[in-house]
Image: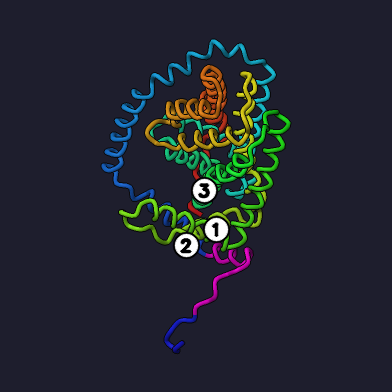
Amino acid sequence: MTASEPETAPPPRRLGDRLEQALEHRADVEGEIERGAAEQPPRRALVRTIVQLAICGVSLYLVAPSVLELLASWRDLDEVAPAWLLAMTLLQAAALVCLWALQRVALHTRDWYAVATSQLAGGAISKVAPGGGAVGAALQYRMLTQAGLARGSAVAGLTASNLLTLAIVLALPVLALPALVRGGVDRTLVEATVVGLALFGVLFAGGAAMLVADRPLAWVGRTIQGVRNRLRRGSEPLTGLPARLLRERDRIVATVGPRWKAALAAGIGRWLFDYGSLYVALTAVGTAPRPALILLAFCAAQLLAQIPVTPGGLGFVEAGLTATLALCGVPAGEAVLATFAYRLFTYWLPLPLGLAGAVLHRRRYAGVSPAPAR
């Protein structure tokens, strides 16, 4: 190395070192995110909104028959015992609490009230507005800054929590494959609970390894990159995926800080309680396929909900979940009723809860000036 060449520091190997290095660049990352959002041209945004509305209208027209068929099953909801509905209510409440706990860690705040009310309102608007995910995140961001949270912290915290929850749900199908290969019965609620606890342990151990060490995550990136390039030989090869995954991981670690274990546990709990409510819905209608099969159907439904052409994946989730449950061996009638019960708790009931969250948030923080950028 010559005297004119700058000395390059070795990459950090320990989590604490990597956390310290990432925190040094956090302000720059937050500033880039905020500047990118502020520089959106108004005309371009208007055209984009019009296109989204048009696509949403056509998509809703195409999926309307499946949605109407599903809604027609409300008459059969009286076949579900009230105890099962109570169990689904408690499981969905637990999933919400886990999500709020994750966001509190990522946002570095102790304010349960602001996080809960803003998440309920943002989650509700994301289920009714075209391109709902971005709209819901923007609403929650505004509500959090109104509650006194720094703008940069709000952006970084919401981004990190969303990345972590998405990464967990993408990992779930991989964990279901060994159970499918192993076979077995696994049809009772007790066995399903044991499977859920085992999933929690495996996910936590795997997630901790990804956050602490570089090699496991880099191996995942290389594997995905290699499979994609083999499947699409005629297109330009994908490169740099391992490095990108490591950068996103470091962003999450820098945001959640030393409480990454709590954030990881909360993120896993958010999905496992949600999955549990789907399994309870199937048990309530008189069918209980193997938990691994239901887990795959659950993951497919969550991925369909990410399709931005309809709010909250409306229509796509209903049709896809009913179809995948039928492939798992659930009779058509029971699949439709279980899907309706599940979507009642995960799509329709959050709408009035979101309105209540917005009202409660406005009552407490009305007249409060938005927080500064830092």
Counting residues from the N terminus, which is met first, the one under dot 2 or under dot 1?
1
**Circle 2: residue type:** Ala
Q: Is residue 150 above or below residue 98?
A: below
Counting residues from the N terminus, which is met first, the one under dot 3 or under dot 1?
3
The reply to whether residue 227 is visible in this rendering is yes
Can you give x and y, in whole percent of width and height, for residue 311 in the image? 42, 31
Q: Which residue is mark 1?
A: 217
The question of residue 265 being in magenta is answered with no
Disc 1 crowd rating (10 Å Cα; few below 14, some 14-19, many 20+) is many
The question of residue 9 being in magenta is answered with yes
| Element under disc 2 | helix
Can you give x and y, in whole percent of width and height, for residue 360 in the image? 57, 29
Q: Which residue is mark 3?
A: 163
| Element under disc 3 | helix
The reply to whether residue 112 is visible in this rendering is no
Is residue 63 rendered to the left or right of residue 298?
left
In this view of the protein, which residue sits in the foreground, 206 or 90? 206
Q: Is residue 360 above or below residue 212?
A: above
Q: Nearer the viewer, mark 3 or mark 1?
A: 1
In this view of the protein, which residue sits in the foreground, 305 or 183? 183
Separation of residues labelled 2 and 3 (CA atoms): 16 Å
Magenta span covers which residues? 8-24
The image's colour scheme reads rainbow
**Circle 1: residue type:** Leu
Q: Which residue is mark 2?
A: 243
Residue 365 occupies which quadrant of the picture? Answer: top right
Counting residues from the N terminus, which is met first, the one under dot 2 or under dot 3?
3
Can you give x and y, in whole percent of width and height, for residue 185 in the image? 67, 32
Disc 2 crowd rating (10 Å Cα; few below 14, some 14-19, many 20+) is some
**Circle 3: residue type:** Leu
